[in-house]
Amino acid sequence: MSEELFNEDERDVLGEMVNIAMGKAGATLAEAFAGFVNLRVPEIRAVSAEDLRETRARLMHTYERISVLEQEFFGEFAGTIAVVYGPASYAALRQVLGFDDRAGDGRRQREELLLELGNALASTCVQEISTLLELRTGLRPPRVMAFDVPTSEADWHLFGELETLAGQMLLIDIVFHLEGHEVPFELMVTVQQNCLPALKQALAKRI
Amino acid sequence: MIVTQCVQNYFKIVLRMISSILVVDDSKSSRKINLAMVRELTGENVTCLEADSGEVALDILGSQRVDVVLLDLTMPGISGFDVLAQMRSKHLHGRVIVVSADIQRLAKERVASLGATGFIEKPIKIEALRAMLTQLGAIHE
């Protein structure tokens, strides 16, 4: 995160809030899989349009195909959260939960599964951050933006501001690794630029 | 009168047993909160130390006696799980209370199996810390 958006103390407090939210979301994921999720320190940074392009390129390099669930949140703490599933994370989901998607409408079943788990992860994460920072927020219904498509073809709102973004926005990147499967589940949160003053105020109260 | 003196002496002995507490967390704000709570609960009886990483914590634990460790789990470099494992393998002294946002059931089971005495979920509440330090004899009600 650059100095232009947050000072060291603000970064530290925000990092801790995100850490707590990540812990709750991680516990949700662990429960869904009846397994253990390795948590790593989340990455929080101010990004420019160029940084977002690099992030998108990194995702294309990491995941050949991708499924993406997005959920917008609004209010004092507003932005977009995306849950990113690579092919391996979906395979792990199928293996651990033991369903057979060859029968019936497999696609719908898979989409519902991604939607359900993604919604649980995204809402836990956003609501926990907003509660800790005492910023009011609401969540719009989640949407499957991409379902098992080549990553380059995925349609993301998260990167929608790429072409119009002036200055920097806040990007929070959380990666969960499901133990025993070496499968990453990635949560990416962007926070709208017009929320940053309220966010900074909320952080200042906790320094 | 004699009984009262005996009780007072007992608590003095117990308090002497816990003379230092090490707070380990990569977050400066978390260390600040944890240290403030420890000082609030223990007064001047206990020496407070801090470490901003698992590496620094192990250095401190290897070089001086620490009675109680408040240990974060999710840290860059050496994690809290690794600190616990190394404390065990190196026979380092100190009873560990994990203070973490990693609230998975398995995380709690793992730290217990690695020798942690207790687990407090983040964000830390002073009553949870009071109960844990009371259990360890660092403070008394």
Image: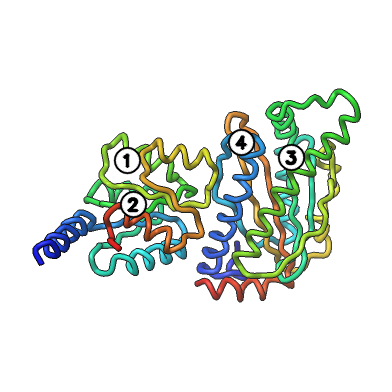
Answer yes or no: do the residues labelled 1 and 4 have beta carbons within 8 Å?
no
Both labels 1 and 3 in a single chain: no
The Cα–Cα distance between marks 1 and 4, rounded to whole angstroms, is 26 Å
Quote the CA–CA distance across marks 2 and 4.
28 Å
Marks 1, 4 in one chain:
no
Q: Position of residue A23 (x, y in %)?
A: 57, 50
Quadrant (top left/top right/bottom left/bottom right) for the C terminus of chain B = bottom left
> What residue is shown at x 37% (from left), y 43% (from top)?
B116
Q: Residues within 10 Å of mark 3 (few under 14, many from 20)?
A: many
Label placed on residue A178: 4
Of the image marks 3 and 4, the number of the one nearer the N terminus? 3
Q: Secondary structure at mark 4?
A: strand
User: Which dot marks residue A85?
Assistant: 3
Residue at mark 2 to residue at mark 3: CA–CA distance: 38 Å
Question: Which numbered dot is residue B69?
Answer: 2
Q: Residues within 10 Å of mark 2 (few under 14, many from 20)?
A: many
| Residue B1 falls in image quadrant | bottom left
Instruction: Say left or right for A201 vs B138.
Output: right
Subunit that carries the residue with mark 4: A
Q: Amino acid at mark 2?
A: Val
Instruction: Name the mark on residue A89.
Output: none
Above/below status of B21 relative to A36: below
Label 2's element? strand
Q: Separation of disc 2 and disc 1 at Cα?
A: 11 Å
- Which subunit holds the residue at mark 1? B
Q: Residues within 10 Å of mark 4 (few under 14, many from 20)?
A: many
Whether the residues at callouts 2 and 3 have beta carbons within 8 Å, the answer is no
Q: How far apart are labels 1 and 3 at the CA level? A: 37 Å
